[in-house]
Amino acid sequence: MILSCQNISKAFGTDVILKQASFHIEDHEKAAIVGINGAGKTTLLRIIVGEMEPDEGVVALSKGKTIGYLEQHQDVHSEQTIYEELLSVKEDVLRMEKKLREMEHEMKHLAGDALSQLMEQYNRISTEYEHQNGYALQSELTGVLKGLGFTEDEFDKKICTLSGGQKTRVALGRLLLSSPDLLLLDEPINHLDLNSIAWLENYLMNYKGAVLIVAHDRYFLNRVVSKIIEIDGGKVMSFAGNYSAYAEKKAQLRETAWKAYMNQQQEIRHQEAVIAKLKSFNREKSIKRAESREKMLDKMEVLEKPSEVRADMHLHLEPQILSGNDVLTVEHLSKSFPGNPLFSDISFQIHRGEKVAIIGDNGTGKTTILKIINELERADAGSVELGSKVHISYYDQEHQQLHMEKTLMEEISDVYPDMTGTEIRNILAAFLFTGDDVYKRIRDLSGGERGRISLARLMLSKSNFLILDEPTNHLDIVSKEILEEAIRKYTGTVLYVSHDRYFINQTATRILELKNHAIINYIGNYDYYLEKSEELTQIYAPEQSEETSAPAVSASSSKEDWARKKEEQAKERKRQNDLKKVENEITKLENRSSEIDELMTKEEVYTDVAECTKLSKEKAELLEKIDALYEQWEALSE
């Protein structure tokens, strides 16, 4: 065992965060702390590393073991470059290397015992240098930097010039290279792209020490961890297995707890009714029996009501107006910034009802495409055309029109005056605003909180085309699940950028990947993308050297394939429409044929020769038409 937490309690005023929390981490174990936002996950990490004192309880780290902690936000000011910053972690190894070089130089001038003694010392330091991976130091450092999404031309950037997300990645790289016995990571993947997340997964799975993570990425948790430590209402409980195993077990426990609670409540109500009835008889015996039951009831250990499952809340999204079938057409789109070409000659279409995810490495131009569609950025070339009756709602944290002086309740109720207070509170709760939070003013919210209230507003809109930029950022797992269900059931069209693979897998019907300045189309969810990624990348967006002219061929091939797919999709839509028309016509003629059969059984008809002849002729014509329609239907079905 490397870490033991026993009976940890922590409260801020009357707000109890942790109540007698106990758990342990074994050597080499990979575990995650989960819970809704505000549950106390970061507080627990800060208590473990000694940044915060618990009100009660003990944190014990095994003797001689080291601990490393990555906070969510990094405020690093340094004149060093990215490469120098990570290299500074290996100062001991660098000193050993310098000492070895000095000793090698000294050996040239020694002989006899002095040389033997120096050789012995050299061998000892050389062995430790090798043990510290000194010979592979440069490749290890470069591998970590590239794995975390830095390109070689960024290695010389100074730390003080980096964004907050880049600083967090540098801090993560430093921590990984320091190789502590226990890694504590608070939201380590918030600023990583898909490739970097996959790299970090593999790194942590093979990490020799123990790892304790706070993360909301369910794909990540399923791959990396073998234990879940849950904080729920201040209580801590451990579950063996990954996130999926935990979710299944948690659902079972919650159902059992609710049944036990409801059964006990029913028994209490029953006993109270019996006691009231016995007292109403107003006789000595009945009163004594009532008092006896009251004593039994007082001794009963009343079960605590299980916490509500916020996943039971549902967001219902429904467009007010039906758009045309062709929602968005992008043709030959190109965009570059000085010294930074993003994409060239890309084309794609989006149809009504599709849920399309745009994915790709950081800096490939995903958000730029959304901005071009919303006329917030101008393309260098190409066109963007919206279809008939398309109404866009755009979620972008940089361009939100929130009213700084309004409270959260006012922000929603002023836009949607028909909603009740309870309905508004339920929507806000789905986006993590509960209790008195709803009376906070927008100006007092953090950037993440403003993003969440903007997302809540957008989800209530009646638009038929939602464009979302990283919609799951700042949401906990339960809120993500609520949003996933809402998007799956939404009958309008959705285009979004996301790094959340589980969210993409649950909601996307199609994926567009920006890669090597081109776009690759995957007709399926994230699992399908993983299956086909390597194959389709080689076909439509292969990496090219500067000398080759293959990109033009690739672009041409991609356009031809896109045109072919468009033609196939158009043919399929026509076939489905024709099939439906034939089926409707068959139903109509069959109904008329049945009507004739019924008429022919009536006396006033079968005794009328002229009417009989007329109906018989119509029946024969109907059967002939029906036979022809069946042949047509079979041909269309084929």
Image (cartoon, rainbow, N blue to C red):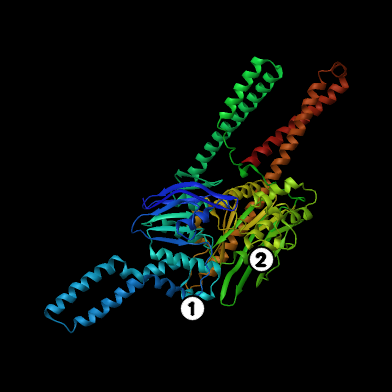
Query: Where's residue 19, x and y in %?
Result: 52, 46
User: Foreground: 518 or 297?
Assistant: 297
Tell me: residue 427, above or below residue 376: above
Q: Nearer the viewer, residue 67 or 271?
A: 271
In the rendered image, is residue 223 in sight? yes
Q: Secondary structure at mark 2?
A: loop
Nearest to viewer (mark 2 / mark 1): 1
Work out which quarter of the rendered image holds the C terminus and state it. Answer: top right
109 sits to left or right of 627: left
| Relative vertical location of residue 331 with respect to residue 577 in this rendering, above or below | below
Locate residue 496, reporting x and y percent: 63, 57
Q: Position of residue 164 (x, y in %)?
A: 55, 68
User: What is the quadrant of residue 121 in the picture?
Assistant: bottom left
* Residue 79 image label: 1
Q: Is residue 226 visible?
A: no
- Amino acid on which the number 2 mark rests in the picture: Glu
Residue beneath label 2, please? 398
Q: Amino acid at mark 1?
A: Glu
Q: Total number of numbered labels?
A: 2
What is the C-alpha distance between the residues marked 2 and 1?
29 Å
Relative to 597, say whether 16 is above or below: below
Residue at x 31%, y 66% (from the top left corner): 132
